[in-house]
Image (cartoon, grey):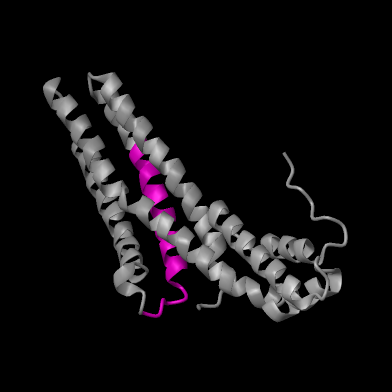
Amino acid sequence: MKASEPPAGDPVETHLADLAARLHGPARLKARMVDELREGLLDAARELSPDAEPGREAARRAIREFGTVAELAPSFQYELTVTQARHTARTVMLIVPCLLVCWSLVELSTRVEGHGLPGSLQVAVAHLGGLSALTALPAAVFLSATGSLGRRLRLPQRLPLVVAWSGTAAAVALGLSALTLVAAAVIAGDWPLTAAACLIVIALHARVATSARVCRRCARLPVTAP
């Protein structure tokens, strides 16, 4: 279904549509921010209008008082970028425990069947686990810096981009982990268990990759901290 177009000649809706087109990030937060701005603009237009119903001129005056799209977009985008980066960071933080659980199940399965994972596969698992742990570090730092304990700290401008690329690295680690799980499935006798672990890793890969891609796009946009 296509998004409804603003009524022809409505300055407020045209202004909001232009602003929404400039913003990128979590859809719910974006919609809520635009709705709150709409209410503020309409209230201001009513106060500026001598009539019961605000006219277009009152709406234009309210828009000028609140600020142009170019003036409002950076501060709005800041909130969207931080929220998206926090979502990406939380997703990245799930990787290490999930990978540990998946690989523990696969290793247990191979031992029960009397098979052991080849040394090269164990080395690959160790390296991928280390990469996943490294990607979790910037994610943890960002969550701390933007949480209740870090609200008084000034957020480094490039930190959301660091989180985005950490998410990308985590997605790569998950993709390679899925390949190593396929190799382990050939060795393991318990195919259903190994296949389930592989599906979990693939699902995590898709989730992290999508979140990191959106985060990279948000982090490259101009923002203004409140």
Total labels: the figure holds 0
Which residue is painted at 53% across and 70% down in the image? 78
- Occupied quadrant, residue 222: bottom right
- The residue lying toward the viewer, choosing from 99 and 49, is 49
Residue 117 showing in the rendered view? no
Q: Is residue 168 left or right of residue 103?
A: right
Query: Where residue 54 appears, x then y in whole percent?
Result: 80, 68
**Residue 72 place in picture, x, y as percent:** 64, 74
Inspect the magenta stretch and tell me whether residue 143 lies in it. Answer: no
Quadrant hosting residue 159: bottom left
Q: Is residue 177 magenta?
A: yes
Q: Which residues are magenta?
A: 153-178
Which residue is drawn at the image coordinates 76% and 48% (left, top)? 4
Residue 77 can be seen in this image: yes
Q: Is residue 127 above or below residue 194?
A: below
Relative to 196, is 223 on the left or the right?
right
Tell me: 169 left or right of 9: left
Image quarter where the N terminus lies is top right
Whether residue 29 sits left or right of residue 110 in the image: it is right
